Image: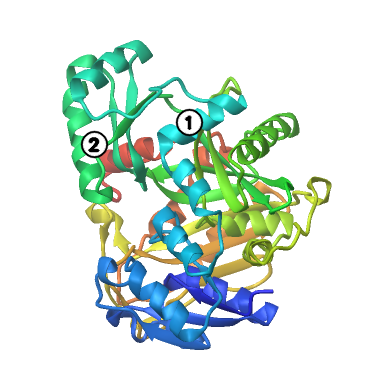
């Protein structure tokens, strides 16, 4: 069993991992930047090591410093959380070379799935439904245009090594393709240091559905049902829920089977997420696989009772899965809202600063994952998410009512947040009806601009 884990992350996910480790009797090491010297994760861990200046590239993305901290403290494993180095195959490879257990898939699997063109090829060979698209990565815009015409417009241009909506553009017509391609390529080069792109037919107004999977080192792979992540802005998720209100048991079984097949085809181990685009006619397509724990993992934990962080650690320790597919039962309904320090009235501009006072809700079926406290500083150097509010109830209607009530109780003073914006979403009839596609927020934003309510 792993004895000590270094957590190569910060914020709420670092605290989430620390808490799981405490319950398992595992020691923890936090790493922090100079800007995070007083951060909660650095205070709660058994040990804490400063790994560099405030900027992420000099601290949380500094592989050498993190590996050195792991060796220095005698940690035998690293948990990367999400973001930062969590899907960096080079980092996983460095851990392997130093005989450090990386809590996630092995570096070769991560590299294969992190490269969208290779991931797509793997899924095609496995018989998992994929969106029509380019067979290989492309760097030349003229060649890309020819491929786009073969696929058929509209097409979506994606960075091969992309994520988080960066290096992604939609071209509806041939005339605008080159401009969008070059823009996406420039973003990819700046964000990921790579200019290889690939193309897919753009599926208009689909539902964004992802399946959580767990896989051990002995060939056992299960799925834990779906999460509906269709509510997003600029490809960034805002509200997630499980189960999806538009999926019945028959379709869930079909999509879950495809998710398990995808994981097995990749030779995957540990926790991962298969992301699909689902059309209203129930056709679905593999989009990508996230080789890490997801921000929205708590909704799956609520409805299945499975502690995903603990399972990650057990799998990395060489244990068999604690569950079979027949053990997994989805009960009730869970919703997660991401609370960000940002201003919806000014195009969701980040709002760092000092939290002067706060009150967070509690009670049955309410969970709040966060690293903030009264007097702490929300840093301008990192993501603006400061908390995740998650609720659980016996059905979707009651979960919405509970989330609406819980959001109404949250008080965070000193920084501007999106809490009131999320509160208003809970009140909308179209949200409560539940048939939400990834274009939902575009419509909401348009209406709000016309009403001058928020924007």
Q: Earlier in the sequence, mark 2 or mark 1?
A: 1
Mark sitting on residue 120: 1
The residue shown at (26%, 43%) is 194
The residue shown at (70%, 54%) is 303
Image x and y of residue 427, in percent: 50, 49
Vertical comparison of 272 with 120: above or below = below
Quadrant where the N terminus is found in the figure: bottom right
Q: Is residue 455 visible?
A: no
Vertical comparison of 100 with 113: above or below = below
Local secondary structure at mark 1? helix
Vertical comparison of 296 with 440: above or below = below
Query: What is the residue that sits farthest to the right in this orientation?
Result: 326
* Near-viewer residue (84 or 359): 84
The residue shown at (68%, 79%) is 23
Local secondary structure at mark 2? helix
Image x and y of residue 257, in percent: 70, 34
* Near-viewer residue (392 or 210): 210
Q: Which residue is mark 2?
A: 184
Q: Give the crowd class for mark 2: few <14, some 14-19, many >=20 residues within 10 Å.
A: many
* Near-viewer residue (202 or 99): 99
Give the number of the mark in front: 2 or 1: 1
Image x and y of residue 144, in percent: 26, 21
Residue 431 left/right relative to 357: right
């Amino acid at each position: 069993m792993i004895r000590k884990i270094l957590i190569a992350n910060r914020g709420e996910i670092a605290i989430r991992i620390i808490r799981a480790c405490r319950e398992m009797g595992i020691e923890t090491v936090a790493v922090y930047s100079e800007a995070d010297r007083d951060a909660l994760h650095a205070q709660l861990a058994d040990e804490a090591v400063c790994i560099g200046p405030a900027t992420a590239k000099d601290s949380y993305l500094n592989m050498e410093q993190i590996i050195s901290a792991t060796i220095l403290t005698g940690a035998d494993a690293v948990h990367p959380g999400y973001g930062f180095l969590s899907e960096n195959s080079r980092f996983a490879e460095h851990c392997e070379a130093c005989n450090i257990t990386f809590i996630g898939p092995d570096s070769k699997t991560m590299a294969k799935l992190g490269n969208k063109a290779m991931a797509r090829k793997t899924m095609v060979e496995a018989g998992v439904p994929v969106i029509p698209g380019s067979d290989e990565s492309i760097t030349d815009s003229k060649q890309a245009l020819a491929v786009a015409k073969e696929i058929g417009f509209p097409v979506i241009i994606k960075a091969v090594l992309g994520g988080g909506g960066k290096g992604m553009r939609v071209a509806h017509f041939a005339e605008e393709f080159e401009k969008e391609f070059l823009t996406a390529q420039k973003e990819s080069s700046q964000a990921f240091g790579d200019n290889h792109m690939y193309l897919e037919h753009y599926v208009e107004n689909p539902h964004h559905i992802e399946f959580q999977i767990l896989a051990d080192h002995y060939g056992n792979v299960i799925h834990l049902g779906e999460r509906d992540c269709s509510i997003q802005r600029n490809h960034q998720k805002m509200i997630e829920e499980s189960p999806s209100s538009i999926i019945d048991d028959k379709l869930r079984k079909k999509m879950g089977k495809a998710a398990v097949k995808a994981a097995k085809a990749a030779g995957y181990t540990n926790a991962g997420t298969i992301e699909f685009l689902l059309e209203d006619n129930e056709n679905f397509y593999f989009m990508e696989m996230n080789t890490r724990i997801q921000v929205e993992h708590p909704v799956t934990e609520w409805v299945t009772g499975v502690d995903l962080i603990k399972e990650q650690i057990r799998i990395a320790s060489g244990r068999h899965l604690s569950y079979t597919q027949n053990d997994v039962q989805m009960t009730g309904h869970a919703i997660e809202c991401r609370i960000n320090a940002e201003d919806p009235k000014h195009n969701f501009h980040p709002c760092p600063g000092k939290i002067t006072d706060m009150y967070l809700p509690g009670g049955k079926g309410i969970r709040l994952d966060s690293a903030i406290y009264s007097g702490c500083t929300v840093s301008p150097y990192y993501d603006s998410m400061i908390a995740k509010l998650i609720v659980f109830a016996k059905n979707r209607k009651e979960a919405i009512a509970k989330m609406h009530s819980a959001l109404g109780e949250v008080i965070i003073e000193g920084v501007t947040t999106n809490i009131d914006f999320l509160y208003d979403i809970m009140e909308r009839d179209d949200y409560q009806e539940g048939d939400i596609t990834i274009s939902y927020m575009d419509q909401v934003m348009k209406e709000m601009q016309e009403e001058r309510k928020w924007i």
